[in-house]
Image (cartoon, rainbow, N blue to C red):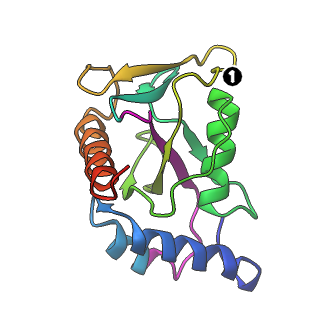
Amino acid sequence: MIHGETDAEILDALVTDAGLAALELDEARAWLGQARHHPMEPLAAEVWVTDQAFGHVLLVKHRWRGWVPPGGKVERGETPRTAAARELAEETGVRVELLPRPAAVSVRSYRSDWPPTLGLSYAAIVSRDVPLGGEAGQPSRWFALDESWESVFPEDRDHIRAHVRRLAAEHRLRGH
């Protein structure tokens, strides 16, 4: 939950990263502008992971959401970026520095009986040779970029694919 002066630094980090996100979905910045004046709970953070060849994405199998990017709830005292890195390590065993610019900011309900949640999607580039681990009953796996995967958020496939292609183009422009 974010409220009060003790969480001002976390709120500043949230607002900054939301403003930097490459993609805004669901009018999330306007939602944040209104919601930041009231306690917000929960916040979500995830990581859109691609390989160094920009041909695959790393997803985890959630028990009822299907294949989704690694992520979860931002815990009290955590910035969304810290939460995203923690969730990535917990769910896949991968520890890596996230890219500076968040991939997306969105607002969605993860369950019909939950309030709308602001979510930040960060990005990371990881070698497919890195061993995968993670939580029991929630396997992680690489999917080819154009491969289909079942998810309760099917629109995410196109957003993630577009972001990976943007990263690949930026990478080529920098001459890597």
Locate residue 125 relative to residue 28 in the image: left or right.
right
Residue positioned 47% across, 57% down in the render: 120
Locate residue 67 relative to residue 44 in the image: left or right.
left
Residue extent of the magenta highlight:
34-53
Is residue 2 or residue 94 the one in the foreground? 94
Quadrant where the N terminus lies?
Answer: bottom right
Residue positioned 22% across, 39% down in the render: 158
Residue type beneath disc 1: Glu
Locate residue 79 relative to residue 171 in the image: left or right.
right
Is residue 111 or residue 83 the one in the foreground? 83
SS at mark 1 in the image: loop
Place of residue 69 in the rendered image (x, y in percent of width and height, measured from the top left): 46, 35
Badge 1 local density, few (<14 within 10 Å), some, or many (20+)?
A: few
- Give the answer, above or below, for where 9 lies relative to 25: below
Place of residue 172 in the rendered image (x, y in percent of width and height, measured from the top left): 29, 50
Rendering quarter of residue 82: bottom right
The magenta stretch spans residue 91: no
Residue positioned 62% across, 51% down in the render: 97
Rendering quarter of residue 164: top left
Which residue position holds label 1?
135
Count of numbered tags = 1
